[in-house]
Image (cartoon, grey):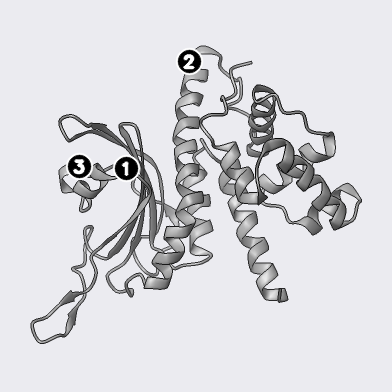
Amino acid sequence: MSSSTHNKESQMFAKLGKVISSAGSERFASDMHALLVESIPLAITRMTEWTLDEPAGEVVRVQSLGAFGAPGDNARGAPAAQCEREPAAHPPLNRILAACDRQLIHINPLMRRGNGGEVTPPRGPGGGFQCHLVSGKANRRYVISLHRTASHRDFSLQEMSFLKNFADTLLPLVEWHASTRRHGELECATAPGATAGLPGVEALRHEFESRLARARVVLSARENEVCLGLLAGKMLREMAGELGVKESTIETYIKRAAVKLGISGRHGLTKWMIDDSVPRASAA
């Protein structure tokens, strides 16, 4: 692996770790945006949770889970508007309603003239190019909406392939973010200060150790630290330096932990952390 490729991978995992550790917080949207723009240019990243009345085929509610970006090409990144448009006005409404698995919805491709030429999409709030990553669970839909301005090029096939593959990691994180927000609101109402006030890394540790206990999995102290390091986006070299051991020793800890958890690799650990079948932390 070349040095530049290694550095890019390291940056990607570090940003993924920030997204994981910020789940449930106001920082989640900006961290998600930073993770994505590392690989593809975007103007706005927006996340929503849709609650459906499935028998009636209607949207009951669209809840914002955060948004970040700049509507203009040259504007500085900032929290984007949180308000949601009426469901009926949302371009991929019917496809979101019908979603039963993870999928990518591409909106506003270049329109074709009769003579074969191309026309860019109209400017304005509804203009520009869009990709929506969607997952369905029971009567809820989780949507990551990615926007580009009309003056930018459309999403390429290569970019959409990247997004579709990355959706297996991103969408469960959005589901976990939504669940963590709901859980945090409940904790604030029943036991203020239980975990809501903890810094991101400490909240991550609290959640990880609670899941270990509830799954009845026992890791050694080093295995525990290495797993937390992976979740926080750290690379082998960094963890080896912190623990004062060789990288091969870190790999051994990872393999031992993976066997105990029944997972494979960093993404397997991420999915284990956000798996709904592993009970969530309860208020202390």
Question: Which residue is the site of mark 2?
Answer: 189
Q: Nearer the viewer, mark 1 or mark 2?
A: 1
161 relative position to 120: left or right: right
Q: Nearer the viewer, mark 3 or mark 1?
A: 1
Quarter of the C terminus within the rendering: top right
**Residue at 47% across / 19% down in the picture?**
186
Quarter of the N terminus within the rendering: bottom right
133 relative position to 33: left or right: left
Kindly indicate the quadrant of the structure image that contains residue 125.
Answer: bottom left
Q: Earlier in the sequence, mark 3 or mark 1?
A: 3
Mark 3 residue element: helix
Question: Which residue is the site of mark 1?
Answer: 100
Q: Nearer the viewer, mark 3 or mark 2?
A: 3
**Nearer to the camera, 200 or 58:** 58
Q: Earlier in the sequence, mark 1 or mark 2?
A: 1
Amino acid type of disc 1?
Cys
- Please report contact status of discs 3 and 2: CB closer than 8 Å, yes or no: no
Q: Residue furthest left?
A: 114
Residue 13 position, x and y percent, is 63, 56
Amino acid type of disc 2?
Ala
Q: Residue furthest top?
A: 190
Q: Earlier in the sequence, mark 3 or mark 2?
A: 3
**Residue at 15% across / 31% down in the picture?**
56
Residue 200 position, x and y percent, is 63, 38
